């Protein structure tokens, strides 16, 4: 092995010292990042700040906040599988729909509390996800084929639900309205901030589960398998088992979003629950925020969920010069689509991913220059150091 | 290849078994013939729609989720040609195909070429955004009301006891001819050779002086052209609305995987299999959506032959 090749490629014996230094640095850095209570401290701070939202906003803005929560839970769920597990799913509508329909069936047909339905939905979604992914991974579907299979499973569930009499075909389920507030029945008067608080609690639980998984041994193994499956398997990691754990967690989290959706909007039908748009929303949320980061999906939800509302609101009451735009259906989604395309083209790593990369680059430069303060000063002055 | 022959025999056997089951459950040979002929004719159209998808995947490695939206765009272009210019729907091919070629070229050059090296979810989201923009653009301009194109001289004819609209026969023949033209273009022209070279090895193709970005543009444009051509051919028997393409999106994915992604002749076989599956399933399980059977077939094939029924096993 020649020296330049050794430096750039896999570290051979000749470059051992250099690789050792790089390795020590990487270990030191990862050691800093694995301090798991840091993540939980951020989560606690986020929940405290976010819980105050109903005191600040109200009415239609609170409805947008609830949608942000649904998008965020979906995005967090998708991110576990795709961002940390490397399995690009285009069928998360399946898990969302299973969560929504399980909850609806328990509440409407069996007359049980929605919490039982949500728990059942989580179990069913995890089972379904593990079963399907086991088949897909067992038959070595990778890349686009894996993505296509997830899409096919979600579509098959939608068509099955449409033709299934016990699930009321295309009619769907409407949750019966109760008098007053009841946490046990997860039902509150319209516009009550309790929907938001309960949803925020669910998002907090989902985030806590994700953090625990990502920082755990199983989560590390999953990420190792994502980065290099062969090497991970060679190190003795049971790749299939860890991938299936990631799928189970991802499916369970996504199904929570379905249950919450049902209790908030009080209606579900096959298209709302299993339509391709649901999978789109989960992907868009996570990718815009940044895949493979804990907070990416939350940031993505905060950015993308209010977007179509903001645009629609703007178009309903446009300024004088744009008055001709008022009252045209479809324009809000066109603007949403254009913004989506621009965001993913400009920030391929997502908002959190780009921020993280930028920070790492800066701290790397800082180490070389002998001080972070200098980097910060330089960047404050607008003089960026080159990447290379 | 003996294995390929085995697979072909198994496919034909499965379709024959499904036909027998359909005959048994419907109890009428005329109904069965109708289903078989309709399935066969619809299958040709599915092949044409899927051909653009398979070409784009084979060369660019992008799953184009905007394929159905491109078909919808083609439908409305046909509608405008027939309505405003007053020309025969099939003459519209001469206008719609170049228009879609240009549209596809612009999309690739402006939106997709800059993200060709990005992870797959980026390209996927760009095509999803494009689909949303096209469908809602159509909604904005033409409104939500369904529209239709009338084909002069369209009537039903008798084929083996089944009644078939002439427009479907024309569409099938036209689709087969176009698939043939596209295949010839790929196999016999310099541009086709360059496209295949880029598909096989983009880096090597670039080193021998092929303009890979240009080839990407041409390939996506050809894919859009195929979607537009399919739109013209199905326009006489399709309800034209902004979301009309969604149906073609679903089936096109199945066809592409059945035929092997990136395999143009495979798309033809896949299209016929999907068309027949859909029609026969409608007879065997009348209460379920026929598409459910299509997806079951899809999933089974995906597991047993992940590179497609007639794809190479490597």
Image: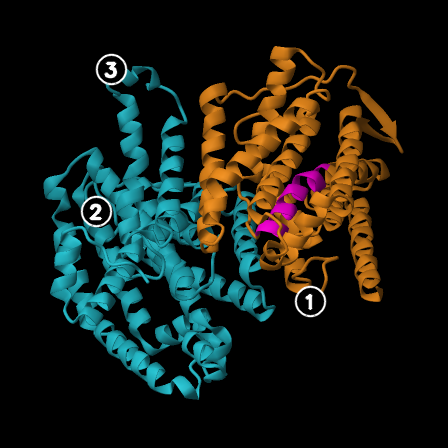
SS assignment at label 2? helix
Majority secondary structure of magenta residues? helix
Image mark 3: chain:
A
Q: Quadrant of residue B81?
A: top right
Tell me the tag on residue A320.
3
The chain shown in orange is which?
B
Q: Nearer the viewer, residue B37 or B114?
A: B114
Which residue is situated farthest in the right direction here?
B160
Q: Residue at x 22, y 37 (%)?
A: A190
Q: Nearer the viewer, residue B42 or B200?
A: B200
Q: Are marks 2 and 3 in contact (CB under 8 Å)?
A: no
Q: Which residue is mark 2?
A: A196
Is residue A52 positioned above or below A337 on the image? Answer: below
Question: Which comes sooner in the sequence, label 2 or label 3?
Answer: 2
Image mark 1: chain:
B
Q: Residue at x 53, y 68 (%)?
A: A134
């Amino acid at each position: 092995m020649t020296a330049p090749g050794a430096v750039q490629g896999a570290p051979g014996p000749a470059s051992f010292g250099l690789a050792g230094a790089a390795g020590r640095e990487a270990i030191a850095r990862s050691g800093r990042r694995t301090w798991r209570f840091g993540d939980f401290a951020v989560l606690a701070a986020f929940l405290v700040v976010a819980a105050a939202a109903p005191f600040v906003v109200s009415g239609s803005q609170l409805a947008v906040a609830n949608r942000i929560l649904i998008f965020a839970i979906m995005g967090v769920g998708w991110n576990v599988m795709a961002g940390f597990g490397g399995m690009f799913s285009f069928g998360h509508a399946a898990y969302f729909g299973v969560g929504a329909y399980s909850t609806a069936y328990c509440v409407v047909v069996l007359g049980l509390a929605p919490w039982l339905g949500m728990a059942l939905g989580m179990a069913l979604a995890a089972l379904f996800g593990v079963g399907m992914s086991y088949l897909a991974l067992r038959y070595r579907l990778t890349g686009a084929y894996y993505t296509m299979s997830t899409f096919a499973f979600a579509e098959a569930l939608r068509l099955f639900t449409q033709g299934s009499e016990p699930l009321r075909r295309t009619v769907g389920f409407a949750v019966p309205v109760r008098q007053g507030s009841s946490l046990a029945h997860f039902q509150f008067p319209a516009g009550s901030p309790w929907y938001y608080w309960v949803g925020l609690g669910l998002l907090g639980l989902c985030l806590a589960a994700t953090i625990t998984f990502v920082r755990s041994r199983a989560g590390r193994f999953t990420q190792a398998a994502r980065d290099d499956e062969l090497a991970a398997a060679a190190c003795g990691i049971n790749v299939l088992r860890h991938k299936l754990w990631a799928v189970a967690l991802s499916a369970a989290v996504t199904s929570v979003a379905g249950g919450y959706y049902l209790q908030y909007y009080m209606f579900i039908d096959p298209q709302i629950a299993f339509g391709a748009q649901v999978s789109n929303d989960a992907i868009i949320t996570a990718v815009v925020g940044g895949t493979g980061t804990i907070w990416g999906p939350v940031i993505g939800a905060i950015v993308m969920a209010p977007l179509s509302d903001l645009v629609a609101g703007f178009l309903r009451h446009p300024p004088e010069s744009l008055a001709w735009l008022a009252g045209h259906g479809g324009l809000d989604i066109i603007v949403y689509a254009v913004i989506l395309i621009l965001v993913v083209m400009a920030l391929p790593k997502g908002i959190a991913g780009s921020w993280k990369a930028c920070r790492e680059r800066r701290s790397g430069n800082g180490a070389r220059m002998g001080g972070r303060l200098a980097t910060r000063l330089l960047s404050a002055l607008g003089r960026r150091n080159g990447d290379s | 290849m003996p294995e390929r022959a085995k697979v072909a025999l198994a496919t034909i056997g499965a379709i024959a078994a499904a036909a027998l089951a359909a005959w048994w459950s419907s109890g009428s040979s005329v109904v069965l013939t109708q289903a078989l002929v309709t399935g066969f004719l619809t299958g040709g159209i599915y092949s044409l729609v899927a051909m653009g998808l398979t070409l784009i995947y084979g060369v660019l490695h992008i799953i184009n989720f905007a394929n159905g939206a491109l078909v919808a765009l083609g439908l409305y272009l046909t509608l405008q040609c027939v309505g405003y210019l007053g020309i025969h729907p099939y003459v519209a091919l001469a206008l719609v195909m170049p228009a879609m070629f240009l549209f596809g070229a612009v999309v690739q050059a402006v939106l997709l070429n800059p993200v060709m090296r990005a992870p797959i979810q980026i390209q996927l989201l760009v095509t999803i955004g494009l689909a949303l923009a096209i469908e809602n653009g159509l909604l904005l301009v033409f409104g939500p009301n369904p529209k239709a194109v009338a084909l002069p001289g369209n009537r039903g004819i008798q084929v083996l006891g089944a009644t078939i609209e002439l427009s479907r026969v024309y569409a099938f023949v036209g689709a087969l001819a176009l698939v043939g033209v596209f295949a010839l273009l790929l196999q016999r022209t310099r541009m086709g050779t360059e496209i295949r070279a880029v598909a096989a090895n983009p880096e090597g193709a670039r080193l021998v002086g092929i303009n890979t970005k240009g080839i990407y543009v041409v390939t996506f444009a050809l894919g859009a052209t195929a979607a537009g051509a399919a739109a013209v051919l199905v326009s006489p028997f399709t309800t034209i609305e902004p979301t009309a393409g969604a149906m073609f999106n679903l089936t096109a994915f199945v066809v592409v995987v059945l035929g092997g992604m990136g395999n143009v002749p495979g798309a033809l076989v896949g299209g016929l299999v999907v068309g027949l599956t859909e029609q026969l399933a409608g007879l065997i399980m009348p209460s379920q959506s026929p598409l459910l059977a299509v997806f079951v077939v899809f999933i089974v094939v995906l597991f047993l032959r992940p590179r497609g029924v007639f794809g190479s096993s490597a």
